[in-house]
Image: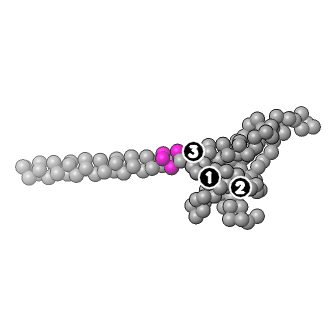
Amino acid sequence: MLVKRALNGVKTLLMTMRNRALSLALLTASLGMLLSTASCSGNDAKAKQALQEHLKGQGVTDLTVDLFYNDPNAPDKAYVSATATYNFAGSDGKLKREFLGYILAREGSGWKVERNTSYTTERQKAATYLAGGK
């Protein structure tokens, strides 16, 4: 009877340790995903800031980043596509909107516009544009 209780105690201890290890692993994975998401959203914000600076004085009232793509093989370059709404209307009376694509270069902790390119919201095409293709 004493041996059986000891075995039950060891099993309980092992299950508790396993549950704690599993909980720690889950917590670590969640934290990692949160940090990677935060860094991506930080890059989005920095890319938007670079675009706003580039388009300053052109009458842009709203700028929405549609895609930010940073290739791990070229960390100093990125592709960004955006939709710009201007403060003037077309012949139909609606505010003018334009779909823009840019290649960005890292400048310090932020980005600067290197050149314009075609617009896309597909990551595969963004990788092609980033590599210099069309």
Report crowding for label 1: few under 14, some 14 to 19, many 20 or more residues within 10 A (C-alpha).
few
Instruction: Determine the CA span between mark 3 and mark 2.
Output: 19 Å
Instruction: Determine the CA span between mark 1 and mark 2.
Output: 10 Å
Q: Closer to the N terminus: mark 3 or mark 2?
A: 3
Magenta-drawn stretch, dominant element (helix, strand or loop)? helix
In the rendered image, which quarter is residue 73 located in? bottom right
Q: Nearer the viewer, residue 35 or 76?
A: 76
Q: Is residue 111 left or right of residue 1?
A: right
Question: In terms of secondary structure, where does tag 2 sit?
Answer: strand
- Nearer to us of marks 1 and 3 is 1
Judge whether residue 120 can be spotted in this image: no
Q: Closer to the N terminus: mark 1 or mark 2?
A: 1
Magenta-tinted stretch = 34-38
Report crowding for label 3: few under 14, some 14 to 19, many 20 or more residues within 10 A (C-alpha).
few
Q: Nearer the viewer, residue 48 or 92?
A: 48
Q: Position of residue 115 (x, y in %)?
A: 74, 56
Question: In terms of secondary structure, where does tag 1 sit?
Answer: strand
Q: Is residue 31 left or right of residue 47?
A: left
Residue matched to label 2: 114
Quadrant containing the C terminus is: bottom right
Please tell me which residue is depicted at 39% across the width and 46% down the height of the picture. 27
Q: Are marks 1 and 3 in contact (CB under 8 Å)?
A: no
Q: Closer to the N terminus: mark 1 or mark 3?
A: 3
Q: Are marks 3 and 2 in contact (CB under 8 Å)?
A: no
Residue matched to label 1: 107
Residue matched to label 3: 42
